Image (cartoon, helix red, strand yellow):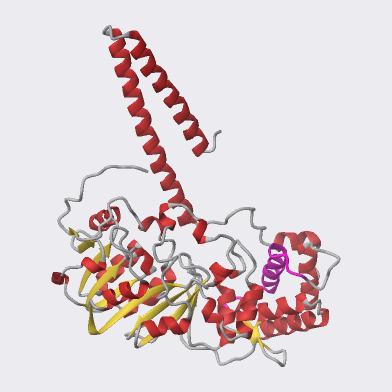
Amino acid sequence: MVEFKSLSKRGNISLIGGATQYWTDLETLGDPSLVNRIALPHVAGRTLIVGPTSRAMREAVCDVADETQFLIRGEADAEQLARNLPDQRIWCGDVASLPEEAGAFDTILVLCDVSQVASLELEARPWATVVDQLRARIHPDGTLVLLIENDLGLHRVNGSTNPRVANSDQDWDPMATWDTTRPRTLDQALGAIPDSEAMAVWPSLRYPKAVVRATVERHLAEAWAFAGATLTNEGPDPAYLLDAAHGADRVNDFAAAWLVISRPRRALPVAIINPTEYLQWNEAPAVGGRSLISEFHNRAASSDLPGVRALVSAWSKAVAEGDFDPDFTLSLVDEAGTVHPLRPSDGGKADRWQALASVAAICRDRAWRTPWPATDDAAAILRQLGAMADLPTISHEDAVRLLPPAAPPGVDAPTQQLLATVAANERELHTMRSKLRWVELQLEQANQRLAAGTVKGYADGATRKARNFIKSTGNRVLREIGLR
């Protein structure tokens, strides 16, 4: 979309080298609330927020920091920040051009990948160079909070799309093809930022559903990775890869991203999952074993009917005897077959039928192999699981009502992503309407010349061209909005 606008006149924006006039990163931000929840406790003193962040996070940082400044590359984003935060200093451009008058900072937050920090107007630089330029602006005892996307993350190696074939402007990453300095393992990420700790982010960079401390035991890392909505997302089934990563003791190497914090000011939580409920663990549960849902997947895949029965029976007994969350993704099972739920229930009697319905729905939606090869009916599978759990028998109709609806075909896009798409379509339609208005003006001028006695052939030619353009533009608009 082409849209011409004058440079900003707002007093709190400073345009520096690398400012990009026709660019925005805020529209592709996603829902980073879990990452924000980890980062905010480490803010203190003079703070610089680099790159796109949510409005809620920007306002929260301004409330707790002594002074807050912002650095963002797109002028449209800088304008938005300046409108929302008229009392804060906004630098629009690249960190390499940040002037000395900005000073040194006690905290720098980079809650996006570095590829969204480096300006598109300057010469491309390696990941390590940009990070060094950021670190140079921190006091010696200051804190850097940096989000690093993992090119070998589960969303990449198991994803349904290849980022190299995405052709929109927002998908272009100058560091994606040649940069060898970007960390591609957790050890490399920690080595790039001295005196740092890390959290693994699942299942995607823009829409995290679980953030797990990188030092937890592999069985807990696997369990919380499964709990991070990895089984309900669109795309290939990640269960096999997570199981293999657990066997190699490399679960964290396949996280979608790592949140690396140098010299953290607070103890990091062990895990936070579910951005709606914010389920948090501050200490690692002192239990061993494997993820219950992973073990169920393995036994079902090998048609181990007695093993599945023993597993479901042990789970049902543990939930019935204790005040535990019945979710299969939030339990472990040890070698003796004892099930250890990872968190208490939210109050009230645990609904084992609903938990089993979620497992049956995963089998249906992910086409998991089950010990009942004669049927792929999720309701029939649910009734079999209920019998294994020693629950009262229910009818097939009741089982159907318990099952969550099957995901519709196509991409299950988060609400914020859908709204961003709608906004982009509205801008495109606005551009086409502007072009259409221009054509109408040309047609009106041609008619005026014709009425004034201008050479008829010229007027007819201009009229014909204008009408053809109107017709083609109208058809394009109808196709864009799905009416043709």
Name the residue at the top extreme: 453
Instruction: Give coordinates of residue 247: x percent, y percent.
Output: 64, 85
Name the residue at the right extreme: 374
- Horizontal side, residue 334 vs residue 386: left or right: left
Q: Residue at x 48, y 84 (%)?
A: 214
Whether the magenta-drawn stretch holds residue 354 is answered as yes
Residue 252 or 82: which is nearer the viewer? 252
Instruction: Give coordinates of residue 124: x percent, y percent.
Output: 33, 64
Instruction: Give coordinates of residue 137: x percent, y percent.
Output: 23, 76
Magenta region, residue range: 343-369
Asked if residue 480 shows in the view, the reply is yes
Q: Is residue 6 above or below residue 225?
A: above
* Quadrant placement of the N terminus: top left
Q: Is residue 449 above or below residue 263?
A: above
Q: Residue at x 82, y 82 (%)?
A: 306
- Horizontal side, residue 187 vs residue 371: left or right: left
Tell me where residue 143 sits by quadrant.
bottom left
Instruction: Give coordinates of residue 259: x percent, y percent.
Output: 41, 77
Q: Is residue 299 above or below residue 482?
A: below
Q: Residue at x 64, y 79 (%)?
A: 243
Whether the magenta-drawn stretch holds residue 445 is answered as no
Asked if residue 392 shows in the view, the reply is no
* Quadrant placement of the C terminus: top right
Q: Residue at x 76, y 82 (%)?
A: 313
Residue 130 or 41: which is nearer the viewer? 130
Residue 319 or 145: which is nearer the viewer? 145
